[in-house]
Image (cartoon, coloured by chain):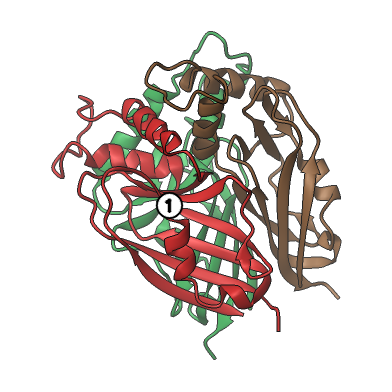
Chain colours: A brown, B green, C red
């Protein structure tokens, strides 16, 4: 079985956000998949998708605080500055964290660990809605 | 052909470890796969999976030394500190390095480059055994 | 449908390079694929593949400038120095940025966002030609 769909994640402020439920609810055919893989690809270059902790909001706070210091705004050697001071750091973060994920599916559900969730890293101040193309490939449980 | 299995990697100390053989030995059906993909997903958020050099242990030492300085313990703005000083840095490293890998399969073997191996990044002092869900999808050689 | 092929990207200087067209032209069967996934895997441990901005060369310049400062040459705790001062930083960058990518295919084309392109990160001074194994899996449009 193959399914493919494009969804729009609602706009979020700069930082890291749990989007597991928003993505899973939009996944057609997931329940009918006994064993397979889901591929998620952001269609943007200034945001990211990553697997991380799904429970304590402080983890997402600390990741944001760390990444802002790792890739600060206003570095004097940056040339790509026309789109604002948050833009070039956002491109760097997108490549460090990644913009695509492949996840295991088992018995009609994402086979995530107990503490795993899908994070959207929104790296722009006003990134707006973000598009994700989701591709499901697997064996039907029927 | 689809195969899926969950394995437990034996507990290892903090640092980077070559786990190619431990994973391949646990992969059912790999030899029968003429062409395909293997997906590996750690079910944890404080360890990582990455492809890197498979020969000189100094490369793994240097990576560990670098990562400890890049994401040090005890940063004063970290709020998620209840689980110990190594926990929040471990979450950061898990997202920077990644917790899932997809690898090409060719003629019943992983199609790795001559110098490529699969590394487990153990980012906790006492992370214990780590679970990996492995999904193989491909064309049968039969 | 499954297709698998190995290609050689032409040698490039240290830095980041747009290789979308070079890869797509070498992808057999892409046009006949209605819906699917392409997997790209570098067979090296001192270069990287990442999705990022496809238009302004300054973005690639700034990424290179940032990465050179993030992982400088000559760190005094590096032990793996025999292959030259650019080698160990190249291994670190390969794991931070990643050496494999999975990309969505839709209607016979890569389903990239408007501003997305595939970057080769060449992290050695003289890395030479780089080998990539490409695996296409999908549903035939026929």
Asked whether A3 or A11 is in front, the reply is A11
Question: In the rendering, at what x and y percent does residue A18 appear?
Answer: 74, 34
Q: Is residue C5 left or right of residue A47?
A: left
Badge 1 crowding class, 10 Å Cα cut-off, few under 14, some 14 to 19, many 20 or more, is many
Q: Residue at x 42, y 39 (%)?
A: C57
Asked whether C16 or C42 is in front, the reply is C16
Asked if residue A35 is positioned above or below residue B56 in the image, the reply reads: below
Which quarter of the figure is the C terminus of chain B placed in? Answer: bottom right
Q: Is residue B58 left or right of residue B50?
A: left
Marked residue chain, label 1: C
Asked if residue C12 is positioned above or below residue C135 in the image, the reply reads: above
Question: In the rendering, at what x and y percent does residue B24 appear?
Answer: 46, 65
Give the farthest residue toward the bottom: B142
Q: Is residue A130 visible?
A: yes
Location of residue B13 by image quarter: top left
Question: In the rendering, at what x and y percent does residue B30 appear?
Answer: 51, 74
Q: In the rendered image, which residue does mark 1 sit on?
A: C99
Question: In the rendering, at what x and y percent does residue C47 appear?
Answer: 34, 49
Asked whether B9 or A6 is in front, the reply is A6
Element marked by disc 1: loop
Q: Residue at x 62, y 28 (%)?
A: A123
Q: Is residue A111 visible?
A: no
Q: Residue at x 56, y 27 (%)?
A: A87
Q: Is residue B85 left or right of residue C58?
A: right
């Amino acid at each position: 079985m193959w399914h493919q769909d494009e969804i729009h994640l609602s706009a979020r402020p700069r930082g890291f956000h749990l989007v597991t439920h928003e993505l899973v609810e939009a996944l057609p055919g997931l329940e009918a998949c006994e064993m397979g893989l889901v591929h998620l690809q952001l269609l943007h270059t200034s945001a990211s998708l990553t697997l991380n902790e799904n429970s304590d909001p402080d983890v997402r706070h600390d990741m944001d605080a760390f990444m802002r210091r790792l890739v600060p705004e206003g570095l004097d050697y940056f040339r790509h500055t026309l789109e604002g001071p948050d833009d070039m750091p956002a491109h760097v973060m997108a490549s460090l964290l990644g913009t695509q994920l492949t996840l295991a599916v088992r018995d009609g559900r994402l086979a995530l660990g107990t503490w795993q969730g899908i994070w959207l890293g929104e790296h722009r101040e006003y990134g707006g809605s973000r598009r994700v193309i989701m591709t499901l490939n697997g064996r039907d449980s029927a």
